[in-house]
Image (cartoon, rainbow, N blue to C red):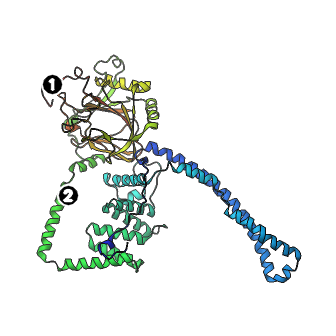
Amino acid sequence: MASNKMWYTLALGFLLPFSYAHTDFFTSIGHMTDLINTEKDLVISLKDYIKAEESKLEQIKKWAEKLDKLTDTATKDPEGFLGHPVNAFKLMKRLNTEWGELESLVLKDMSDGFISNMTIQRQFFPNDEDQTGAAKALLRLQDTYNLDTDTLSRGNLPGVKHKSFLTAEDCFELGKIAYTEADYYHTELWMEQALKQLDEGEVSSADKVYILDYLSYAVYQQGDLSKAMMLTKRLLELDPEHQRANGNMKYFEYIMAKEKEANKSSTDAEDQTEKETEVKKKDYLPERRKYEMLCRGEGLKMTPRRQKRLFCRYYDGNRNPRYILGPVKQEDEWDKPRIVRFLDIISDEEIETVKELAKPRLSRATVHDPETGKLTTAHYRVSKSAWLSGYESPVVSRINTRIQDLTGLDVSTAEELQVANYGVGGQYEPHFDFGRKDEPDAFKELGTGNRIATWLFYMSDVSAGGATVFPEVGASVWPKKGTAVFWYNLFPSGEGDYSTRHAACPVLVGNKWVSNKWLHERGQEFRRPCTLSELE
């Protein structure tokens, strides 16, 4: 990294290797479970290898002990020792034959089974993208749920069954991944956590010099020159000859001197500019703040007066013959837009069938590109999904019929049942299910019009996080296994209801499975007729 230019002395290398593979393991907990079995097989293979190596070493050890005694005796009186013809013969034999046999034993590869197993399994291992994706997920969870680095590092999360913790080396790796994304805010947080754990006495392969190198640069990039200098001084105390740190220190001192020479008026003007910038930052992405607050169970609350208008009831699907004698339990989740939840609407057996059908087909979830109208992957949707047709399973067909009976809408023009499994920090940021006016070709290839309504099954409980939230109105709907929620995306006039903008919050702890049915306009003309008012 040496350079004649001072700016380049501040640069750190991007240390992660590049990989061409694209497996997206991190986007689905369901697919990641297969890796647990893979690792278990490798551990068994590794233990077999260790046993074979221990047996080999035991043979070598016995041979070394025997020769140790023999050579001790021989070196005390070499001529007298070799005066015995048997000793002379055996010396020739040992050096000509036995040492060669020992060499072969030492060089013998006892790991055939382990290495071949590793070679086969390695093609199915996660790649750099998976590791980076999982790291970004931790950073996303940290931001969304206001978690400090110490809480995450110690694994103190709500609802955890298997507590785990991050080592100083793990924290260092998270900081490096944040650095490669030019995310200096998180680089600082995680490098400081790594340093803290080392200062507390944790034994680790992580090096304080490397950590301070990244940390001082990340702090400098965020404009805190005095702290960057303090960290660089600490680095130089550990390694006085560190070339980059010495160069950086000279540069920091030069900048500091220039700042002291600046006149008061320019300083005041800069302070004012910083304050204005800070105000702008506070106004930046207001929806993001509302979304994250709702994910944490905070934000706007419904007034008691509005709350009184929400009811629980037994619902027969508007006197549907299948449900007159056995109505289902229904409760109001929100009034505008009206969101209702159906309880005990899908059985555990049906859930398991749907999951088993979907697992072999799970692939990275896609979204509609508003410009092309085609499906594409996106960083704001972290999950894997699969599509199931009614004709391939009586369970899926029965589920489709149930949705039609209870919504009163025709499912023949609906999309197939989409099954989704969320990965590490799995989420789907705020979005609309329906196509807006500036997206006329969003569902053109389907030929069934816009998405009139959404039906969403919750197929698992989630220990922490994973809510479905509506930032426009402040509604939070929490996952509950065996239930489903339903809402209309369009007014009867066909105009989009923008209050239905919603998001799937990151899964903090647990495994989230959902399935959804998007119902379309075609076929609903007489089931949900248009009204006189555009927004009624």
**What quarter of the picture does the C terminus occupy?**
top left
* Image-quadrant location for residue 439: top left
Question: At 30% from the left edge and 22% from the top edge, which residue is drawn?
Answer: 317
Q: Amino acid at mark 2?
A: Lys
Q: CA distance from mark 2 to mark 1?
A: 43 Å
Badge 1: few (under 14), some or many (20 or more) residues near its Cα, within 10 Å? few
Q: How many marks?
A: 2
Q: Nearer the viewer, residue 74 or 270?
A: 74
Residue 456 vs 424, above or below: the answer is above
Outermost residue toward the top? 321
Q: Which residue is mark 2?
A: 281
Q: Is residue 473 left or right of residue 533?
A: right
Q: From the top left corner, tell me how far across and down residue 305 is, in percent.
A: 19, 36
Badge 2: few (under 14), some or many (20 or more) residues near its Cα, within 10 Å? few
Label 1 residue SS? loop
* Image-quadrant location for residue 511: top left
Q: Which residue is mark 1?
A: 531
Q: Nearer the viewer, residue 373 or 533?
A: 373
Label 2 residue SS? helix
* Image-quadrant location for residue 441: top left
Residue 296 vs 235, above or below: the answer is above
Question: At 17% from the left edge and 80% from the top edge, which residue is drawn?
Answer: 261
Q: Amino acid at mark 1?
A: Thr
Q: Nearer the viewer, residue 301 or 98?
A: 98
Q: Is residue 518 left or right of residue 117?
A: left
